[in-house]
């Protein structure tokens, strides 16, 4: 039977240990790849990023990405690209973004200082963006950022200037979860056989050390060419308001197979046999909604599991603050941004034990990692019924969340692109 990750409960009662910013483990509960709070605060100064760009001779950056932030299916990858693009633009860089079209939205738009071109179909964008780039040879002072989200743009074949690749995680079994068999086989072949050969010399930026290990082990990319830059947390996510008077579990994400909300619902049903007044809210929208609603109905859980759809950012922050626990049972994540957003509100996490989550959640310090529906149910029950444990992990989550800022993420990624400029020079 799957259980809570071994040793987590014992560590929850012990002094915190985690990664040090400069390397190895420290006694402060901070991942090695994250700057200290003073450095994170310093990174908010746009003149620092401007100096990094100027030293590299970088004036203009083009992004190519599958989807735009306004896309109905946009998620963490789109938010990540948007935050970095906007902060780079604030630092004086000329930033453009090329994505597929957004239904019912204009083709050209400006957002937070950078320009977006949104046209082409879901799959046509990969070829059309490449052809556009081939017609415009990179000028001095220009660089490219490719967002490799499942299917790559194959930028090594068509861009000769300084180049950076955002790769949040390996998709692996995700192909078979969402595509017909023949398309899944094609996706797997591209990801595991073709792309690694083409991208072997590329500078890749990913979100977590555990995702870096998977990229190196599963795709065979060079370890020293993969940089880790964890995502930031929006300032609006902060403590405030009151916790729910009844046990409340909140989960956030697109309603798609990889998030495995069906597993979460099964775990919640098990927990409610022992925590009688449990309530749960799964925030998000997606094509899995009918299946999840049917599963909820089969368990007679319609009165206590709510599926409110998308909510605005203010309402999302309130759900995090009211929750006793935030949960994620995802199969694949580069990080788990909802977990650290909730952490910034003082809410601990129960999450699946996968790459990405292993960095977003310090097992036994800021939350609990678990495997399978039984393991998730056991972890949730422990968290909901042990007030001291919940308070201790919530405090640990809050303290650690202060290390993560989008400005620090933007600086780390810009320095990676600047290093490619210097390498080519």
Image (cartoon, helix red, strand yellow):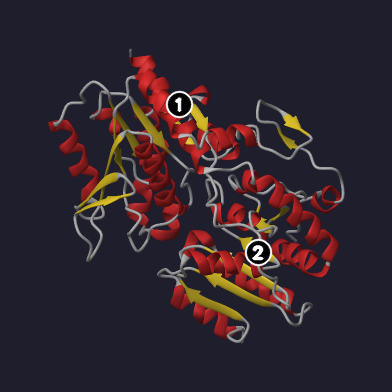
Observer-nearest of 311 and 281: 311
Q: Earlier in the sequence, mark 2 or mark 1?
A: 2
Image: 372 above or below 27: below
Residue 219 in view of the camera:
no
Q: How many marks?
A: 2
Res. 240 mark: 2
Observer-nearest of 277 and 240: 240
Q: Name the residue at 79% across, 50% down.
A: 6
Residue 416 in view of the camera:
yes
Residue 194 percent coordinates (x, y) = 35, 34
User: Which quadrant of the rendered structure holds the N terminus?
Assistant: bottom right
Residue 234 percent coordinates (x, y) = 52, 52
> In the image, is 107 to the left or to the right of 258?
left
Q: Is mark 1 on a helix, strand or loop?
A: helix
State the image quarter where residue 105 is shown. Answer: bottom left
> In the image, is 82 to the left or to the right of 356?
left
């Amino acid at each position: 039977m799957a259980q809570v990750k071994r040793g987590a409960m014992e560590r929850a009662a012990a002094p915190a240990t985690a990664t040090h910013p400069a390397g190895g483990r420290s006694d402060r509960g901070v991942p090695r790849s994250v700057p200290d709070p003073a450095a994170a605060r310093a990174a908010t100064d746009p003149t620092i990023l401007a100096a990094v760009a100027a030293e590299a001779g970088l004036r203009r950056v083009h992004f190519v990405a599958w989807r735009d932030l306004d896309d109905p299916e946009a998620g963490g990858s789109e938010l990540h690209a948007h935050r970095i693009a906007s902060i780079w633009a604030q630092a004086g860089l000329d930033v453009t973004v090329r994505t597929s079209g957004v239904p019912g939205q204009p083709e050209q738009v400006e957002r937070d200082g950078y320009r977006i071109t949104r046209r082409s179909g879901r799959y046509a964008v990969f070829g059309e963006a490449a052809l556009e780039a081939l017609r415009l040879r990179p000028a001095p002072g220009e660089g490219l950022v490719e967002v490799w989200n499942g299917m790559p743009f194959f930028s090594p074949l068509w861009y000769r200037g300084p180049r950076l690749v955002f790769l949040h995680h390996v998709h692996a079994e995700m192909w078979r979860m969402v595509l017909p068999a023949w398309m899944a086989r094609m996706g797997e072949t591209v990801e595991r056989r073709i792309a690694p050969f083409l991208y072997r010399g590329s500078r890749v930026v990913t979100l977590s050390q555990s995702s870096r290990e998977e990229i190196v082990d599963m795709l065979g990319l060079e370890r020293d060419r993969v940089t880790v830059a964890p995502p930031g947390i929006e300032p609006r996510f902060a403590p405030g308001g009151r916790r729910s008077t009844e046990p409340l579990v909140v989960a956030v994400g697109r309603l798609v197979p990889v998030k495995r909300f069906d597993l979460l619902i099964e775990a919640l049903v098990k927990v409610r046999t022992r925590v009688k007044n449990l309530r749960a809210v799964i925030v998000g929208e997606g094509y899995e909604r009918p299946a999840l609603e049917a599963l909820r109905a089969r368990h007679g859980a319609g009165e206590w599991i709510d599926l409110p759809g998308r909510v605005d950012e203010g309402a999302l922050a309130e759900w995090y603050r009211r929750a006793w626990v935030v949960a994620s049972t995802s199969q694949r994540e580069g990080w788990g941004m909802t977990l650290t957003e909730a952490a910034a509100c003082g809410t601990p996490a129960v999450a699946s034990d996968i790459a990405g989550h292993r960095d977003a959640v310090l097992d036994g310090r800021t939350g609990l990692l678990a495997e399978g529906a039984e393991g998730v149910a056991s972890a949730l029950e422990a968290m909901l019924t042990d007030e001291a444990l919940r308070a201790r992990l919530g405090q640990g989550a809050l303290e650690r969340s202060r290390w993560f800022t989008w400005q620090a993420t933007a600086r780390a990624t810009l320095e990676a692109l600047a290093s490619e400029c210097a390498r080519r020079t």
